Image: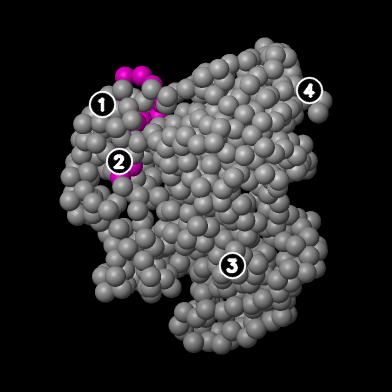
Amino acid sequence: MKKTPIAAAMLALSCHLFSANAQSQNLVVQVNKPVTEVKPTMWGIFFEDINFAADGGLYAELVKNRSFEFLNPMMGWKEVKKGGTGKVLVTNHENENAANPRFAHITVNAENGVYGLENEGFRGIGVQKDKEYLFSVLLRNSSDMKLRLELVTSKGEKIGESSSINLNSTGQWKKYTLAFKATQTEPKAKLQVLFEGKGELDADMISLFPKDTWKNRPGGLRADLVQMLADLKPGFIRFPGGCIVEGRELSNRYQWKTTVGPVEDRKLIMNRWNIEFKEPRNASDYFQSFGLGFYEYFQLSEDIGAEPLPILNCGMACQYNTGEVAENVDPYIQDALDLIEFANGSENTKWGQLRKAMGHPAPFNLKFLGVGNEQWDEQYIERYKEFDKVLRQKHPEIKLVSGSGPSSDGSRFDYAWKELRKLNTDLVDEHYYKSPEWFLNNAKRYDNYDRKGPKVFAGEYAAHMKDSPIPESKNSFQSAIAEAAFMTGLERNADVVHMASYAPLLAHVEAWQWRPDLIWFDNLKAMASPNYYVQKIFSTSKGTHVVPVLNNGAVLAGKDSIYASATIDKKKNVLNLKVVNTSNAAKTFNVNLEGASAVKGGTWEVLSSSEPFAYNSLDKPTVVVPVTTAAKVKGTSFKVNLKPGSVNLLTLPIK
């Protein structure tokens, strides 16, 4: 890859990652001396609705502002006049539905043509040739009319249409559905909802979904994105964030109860990332419809075999914004108790009954619950103690996740750990967005942590580099290899670190607020970053027990630019050896297995690049991808060769 200006600017920084050293190494893998179990939750994923990750992303709805609840009720919509005229009046019926009070009152005068509305979608509507799309709308009309649909390109060319259906005058709300196919692939299509005849009607919940959603669920999730999550085989999903749990102020916080039940009764709010950043990252059209709500999060976790880890507001708004706190935390604690009932309660309980009504009679088997996100100082500890006291008494089976604030060290971090250690809390969430050097230098971070104290949840981490105009460029190989080196330290200390997740997870290339991100997508395609492949290497080979990897009796955590860790899977009789070479020289290793012998059938997976600033993009998604070959090794001793700048996974059947 041709070096970009950012590559030149970062050349000195990259020398630390790719320093030459041709010296051979010896590795001893003590297969017969497992030191600790690896928790099934070791490697997971963290979902936050940032970068259009939910609406416009994972949630497959294609219509923006479908119920006219944005601050600007007509945002995303415009009139269509084709031989007809009319007008639109946004009306509020709060007394009928306080959660979804607005609808469009439409006057149609189109006896010899059509009049209607056009929706622009989320940076356009992505449609694929010959794929079927499902439309629905709630209408209340006082006159007989007809309804039909058209898909058009950004230039107005028709690329799909439905047949017309009759709308009979009933005076009552009625749901209408239509299905049609696109005649060509178009990432920037628009939907036109057209009426024929003369009269008045009310319209709400105007919706369009691809038929091909995850598990073909109507109104479901975008299948290609969910598949990429499933391919990680995550041990948990942390949701719904992140800073949106806190809100800019408490009124804007995430409230799980408004995200369950019928979709049309869920209360839309402004996404706090709507106004967090200025140009070019602002997103005035960023709202949360909660079509992807807590029920869907639990369902997604179950679908891909991950433990659900919901995070709830602790009575504090974001301390970087208003810092507002609730004087009385009892309602927030009750929300936590009710959520546990929703997830685990019997069908005879209030919230368990709602879960059943939504289609899931069996409990979701919730085991973890997070209290707060990135709060700090006394005001957080005071509120967390109240949660801890009630939840430990009423639900001792639930492991609580507390927080250490937004930094990886410092006085606030130390204070949180001191207080949370006194409480003997289950897990402490640590966050670090740092330079690649920090990740390399901290591969031994947990070697000396208290083995008897609270366990660590590395809940948000990513190696950050300087910006480049191309969105995906910040997910460079340099950041990925630094994270891999650090993750060998997490794995080596699996008795302390029970959970870990990269952050953020998803980003739309035309609607991002934060970089880097694990997966980039547009309206039609999705791309795995080099960082995604690092996560996948670890998460799909976590094994059941950590075993030592030693060089002259010491762990390898930076000596001669090498980092290593290993696990065995006692159920499958497999050794997973991970070795990260951050130098620009090839390395030869003499590997000795103690207490086991390798047999045929192993694999060698390598993620490498000669250019530290290489990155994948939607147009070129395979610049940095892992290559898997057969591992032609057996016995107790063998040699392996490591490429310069490489993340290596050797998976060996053993006896």
Q: Is residue 480 left or right of residue 322?
A: right
Tell me which amino acid carries mark 4: Lys
- Whether tag 3 and tag 1 are in contact, CB under 8 A, the answer is no
Residue displayed at 65% across by 50% down = 123
Does residue 403 show up magenta in the picture? Answer: yes
- Provide the residue designation for mark 2: 426
- Whether tag 3 and tag 2 are in contact, CB under 8 A, the answer is no
Residue 458 visible (yes or no)? no
Which is closer to the viewer, label 3 or label 1?
1
- Provide the residue designation for mark 1: 418
Tell me which amino acid carries mark 2: Asp
**Residue 560 at x, y = what percent?**
62, 15
- Provide the residue designation for mark 3: 215
Measured Cα–Cα span from mark 3 to mark 1? 46 Å
Which sits in the foreground, 276 or 512?
512
Classify mark 2: residues with Cα within 10 Å, few (<14), some (14-19) or many (20+): some
- Identify the mark nearer the N-term, 4 or 2: 4
Classify mark 4: residues with Cα within 10 Å, few (<14), some (14-19) or many (20+): few
Which is closer to the viewer, label 3 or label 2?
2
Measured Cα–Cα span from mark 3 to mark 4? 42 Å
Does residue 552 show up magenta in the picture? Answer: no
Q: Which residues are magenta?
A: 400-412
Tell me which amino acid carries mark 3: Lys
Which is closer to the viewer, label 3 or label 4?
3
Measured Cα–Cα span from mark 4 to mark 2? 46 Å
Note whether 622 is above or below 579 in the view shown: below
Residue displayed at 25% across by 26% down = 418
